[in-house]
Amino acid sequence: MPFRHSGGLKLKIERPNFHIVTGGPGAGKTKLIEGLAARGFRCVEEAGRRIIREQAQTGGNATHAGDRFAYRALMLAHAVGTYEAEMGTAQPVFFDRGVPDLIGYSRLIGAEVPPQLEEAVARCRYNGTVFIAPPWAEIYDNDAERKQDFAEAVATHDAMRTAYGDAGYALVELPLTSVEARINFVLARIGAQAPRRAR
């Protein structure tokens, strides 16, 4: 079912300097974000990994393997909070996932999309072009926070592609190449739209 915005809210690009990198797990998006941060750009880390670490430290169950609804609620709070925290920033900001990812996550776990999530997707608008990292079997690996198998990584990618398309974003696939080449690819794309550079 296509995503529908609640409350009659208009779709518009509110933050053209807010750039999302999305995709399935293990596709290299976090390495790209880390590389951009190393070059001095403002970057926002993925909520999921931080929440999993925090839940492990506190004995909580709000994880993908546990209470997925509580996990989604924490991710939504993080995504909206970091969006709002960067609203005074004029330079480019790169987000390791954005609010619409949670539409994709909801579909992935077979859950209804709650009204507050629909409202957040309509209100928290990013640059209209979203970078998506395609599944990449050659670099896929599990770690302490990533437990999914490659098939689930592919399913996650597909869910994110659909969610962002339905939310009105244009998707640009990252090339299967080195981190440095990916960084240059992204900067070339946003440079054509917003030539500002990080200080």
Image (cartoon, helix red, strand yellow):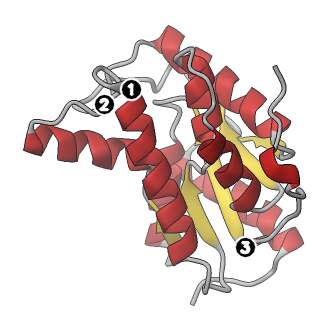
Position of 78 relative to 60 (above/below): below
Say which residue label 1 marks. Answer: 68
Say which residue label 2 marks. Answer: 63
Taking the view exactly as shown, the residue that stands out farthest to the bottom is 199
Asked whether the residues under the numbered discs 2 and 1 touch, taking CB atoms below 8 Å apart as contact, a structural biologist would say yes
Residue at 48% over, 65% down: 81
Position of 195 relative to 63 (above/below): below
Please state if 117 lies on the left or on the right of 123 as rendered.
left
**Image disc number at residue 54:** none
Q: Residues within 10 Å of mark 3 (few under 14, many from 20)?
A: many
Q: Residues within 10 Å of mark 1 (few under 14, many from 20)?
A: some
Counting residues from the start of the chain, the first of labels 2 and 1 encountered is 2
Q: Secondary structure at mark 1?
A: helix
Q: Residue 63's image quarter?
A: top left
What percent of the width, then of the height, locates residue 17?
Answer: 72, 73
Asked whether the residues under the numbered discs 3 and 2 touch, taking CB atoms below 8 Å apart as contact, a structural biologist would say no
Counting residues from the start of the chain, the first of labels 3 and 1 encountered is 3
* Spatial CA span between label 2 and label 1: 6 Å
Q: Please, what is the three-letter code of the amino acid marked with disc 2?
A: Thr
Note whether residue 15 is visible: yes
What percent of the width, then of the height, locates residue 150?
Answer: 48, 13
**Image disc number at residue 17:** 3
Please state if 144 lies on the left or on the right of 149 as rendered.
left
Q: Please, what is the three-letter code of the amino acid marked with disc 1?
A: Arg
Front position in the image: 20 or 174: 20
Query: Which is more foreground, mark 3 or mark 1?
Result: 1
What percent of the width, then of the height, locates residue 20?
Answer: 65, 54
Taking the view exactly as shown, the residue that stands out farthest to the top is 151
Position of 69 relative to 93 (above/below): above
* Spatial CA span between label 3 and label 1: 31 Å
